Amino acid sequence: MITTLFRFQKVLIGLFFLLLVLCGWRILHLEFEHVHHDFIPSGNTEFEFLEQFTTEIEEDDIGLFVAIDHQKSIFDTAFLHKFDAFTQACSQIPHLASTNSITTLTDFVKGPFGFIETPFIHPNDPGKFSKDSLRLSRDSRVLGSFVSDDFQALTVIMKTVPGATQPQADEVVAALDSILQVFDFPKVHIAGKVNMQSTFVRIAKQEVIFYLVLFSALIMLMLGIFYRTVWGVIIPLIAVNGGFLFFLGYLQVTGQKLDIMSTMFPTLMLIFGMADIIHLQTKFIDLMEEGLDRFAAMRIALQEIGLALFLTSLTTAIGFATLLTSQIRAIKFFGLNAAMGVLIAYLCVVLFASMGLMLFNKKQMSRVRAQYQFWERLLERVYYTNQRKQWHILAIALATLGVALFGISRISTNSFLAGDFPRKSELRSDYYFFEQKFNGSRSLEIAVMPKQDLRATDPIILGQIDQLERYLIDSIGLRATYSPTTLYKSLNKAYSNGKLSAYTLPKNPETLERYRKQIDKIRNFQEQRVMNDSGTMARITGQIPDLGSNGIAAQNAQIQQWMESNLNLELVDYRFTGISLLIDRNNSYTIRSLGFGLLLAIFIVGILFAFIFRDIKMVLVSLVPNVLPLLISGGAMGFLGIELKAVTSVIFTVSFGIAVDDTIHFLTRFKLERKKGLDVDTALRNTFQISGKAIMLTTFILLLGFLSLIFSDFSGTYYIGLLVSVTLVSAMIADLYLIPQLIYWINPGSRKTIAAPHEGQSEAVQ
């Protein structure tokens, strides 16, 4: 196999560059998108119900909210005229189903010849501002929705067409930005899924490019320090960047699109490829240092390192592939694509980088000799510490375990919707603006399903809905609710000369029947569908503050308990629903999915180790040093207050797949040394000298790569970078200190007593 590769060296190099050109062309057609539903578990009854519910009744996340903060009273003629002109301009934006603001909304009063429309505010008549202000302050339908509580901000509420695509969302946001530039309001705040989608995609595009450039620069710097030759830098750089281009080409060919999880791909692809090539290149140079020619050195390097590289790539891919068990589409496809990326990086190193390295001799690849003496002294000291400080190592490991378990007990699953927003974007500040100035940034959605062939418009069902709404307003604190009763209350107010006190549900069934016949003749000012055409499904909705997933769960439990005690559940079913609720319930699902995925990864890797070593004790030796770093990462998560949710849940399976790589390099080298007939102690000592340097170098490179993710605006990416870095460092320490202790433990009497090496002195490697 290796001889065949050598025979087709030039062909493989030519094929590599041909594929680069083809992939580069396909990448030009690669698209970005952010689909909110991709981060919600599918395949469960709640998700299926929401899909059915929003198919029959308007979706709950198609609103686009633009708040203009005047920073003083809105009762300013010039401001109101400018705001009204802005509203009219927004109504011309494509892909919008409706556009409303306080200057375009009208109320209704029943006159002798029909309904009379009356404005909520009179921009052309300042003399009515006092009366308008008093009226708005008492009208919960508009206060907190269209007008801020302090009367200093107004909102334009737009609704996009259902199922708006990413290009349509981008077009809406671009048109809105152009309009805002024309009107040049001092303070503008925007909320809604459409704006969030476009912002996420824009930042994701920027970060993919940023990390590709950043890590390429880091690679050049590190390789320059390690090898100090031009070709020692260029060959690895071309190989790993080529692997990333192949990966992007694979995504485009398979019809996939990049999303916010994709911001990690440049770092992941480059560090996986770099870790592989560092092991191969280091061994290749070491063998040439011993006097072997290029072809002999590469043949032995591939024979001795190739299996370890394959196993490390396989275990890392397994770690990612276990994410396929997730019901969250974004996590599932991230795991699949990351696993494919690992294998692509491996193939690039074995098939192409190895061929490129053989084009140059030792002097062209590395000019550093003193470096070897440094590593020999450092690794000799690590070996000595393992020999003489076994009880210190054990005590530190146990203490670290105790602290980690305590930290894990502090992990929180109480997440807030804003927690997923880019850390430095205006989305966060806009979100909190709506939280403070208006009714809140979160929707409370309750589905209403009449039983016994009843309809939502039947008087008995309307009475049940009204009873629940009054409880939500009086006891839960909702400012306003919208449901089928809203239509009837609005008509009752219109028939009562517009008195706000008449905004109630009539008790008389005949009056309700009369109003029902009027409903189709009048457009409700909210233009919001509150029930399906048949009346078999209805919605109660209102805006609430974001109390966090735990707070919302407690509030929903309180509402549920009240409904069971006060409503006739034989007449109607009530069910909490909505995108926000499903995001909250991700937490409990995430914990179950995390445990299953992690156990599956450990089980598969354990089977792999059992096949390699044919010794159950060696399986234990291989797994213990990799489980401890996961616990340390979990402890760090608890101490740092990082929430466990969908995005951060991938940390543990990813960490395990990556951390086990160095263990494989260490133990496969140990196995090779033992096959030479060496005793345990000498085999360990040689393993430190041969594999220890590559383990430290690759950990350093991986660490720099993952630490670079802390520059991400996405909190999930930031935390993954931080916590995987913690795992990498602790995994390297565990490999260098725990594995030797476990090997000594399963081989009693193999430990030799040696004298400590003198400073600056290195003992010969046996």
Image: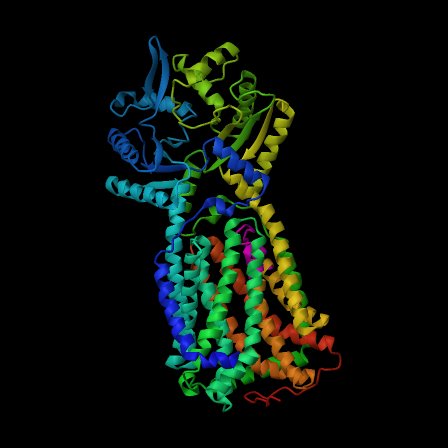
Q: Nearer the viewer, residue 349 or 101?
A: 349
Q: Is residue 729 left or right of residue 602?
A: left
Q: Quadrant of residue 757?
A: bottom right
Please report the residue visible at 44 percent of the width from the left and 85 percent of the height from the top. 368
Residue 708 drawn in magenta: no
Please state the horizontal and vertical placement of residue 380, each as a whole percent of the image: 59, 83
Please report the residue visible at 44 percent of the width from the left and 75 percent of the height from the top. 353
Q: Give the magenta part as a residue range.
A: 635-655
Please state the horizontal and vertical placement of residue 351, each as a whole percent of the image: 47, 74
- Residue found at the far top of this picture: 112
Indicate the quadrant containing the C terminus: top left, top right, bottom left or bottom right.
bottom right
- Compared with 689, 729 (above or below) is above
Please report the residue visible at 71 percent of the width from the left and 72 percent of the height from the top. 615
Please state the horizontal and vertical placement of residue 352, each as a whole percent of the image: 44, 74
Q: Is residue 316 left or right of residue 389?
A: left
Residue 631 seen in the current view = yes
Please state the horizontal and vertical placement of residue 143, each as a whole percent of the image: 40, 28
- Residue found at the far right of this picture: 748
Residue 652 drawn in magenta: yes
Q: Quadrant of residue 73?
A: top left
Residue 400 seen in the current view = no
Q: How many marks?
A: 0
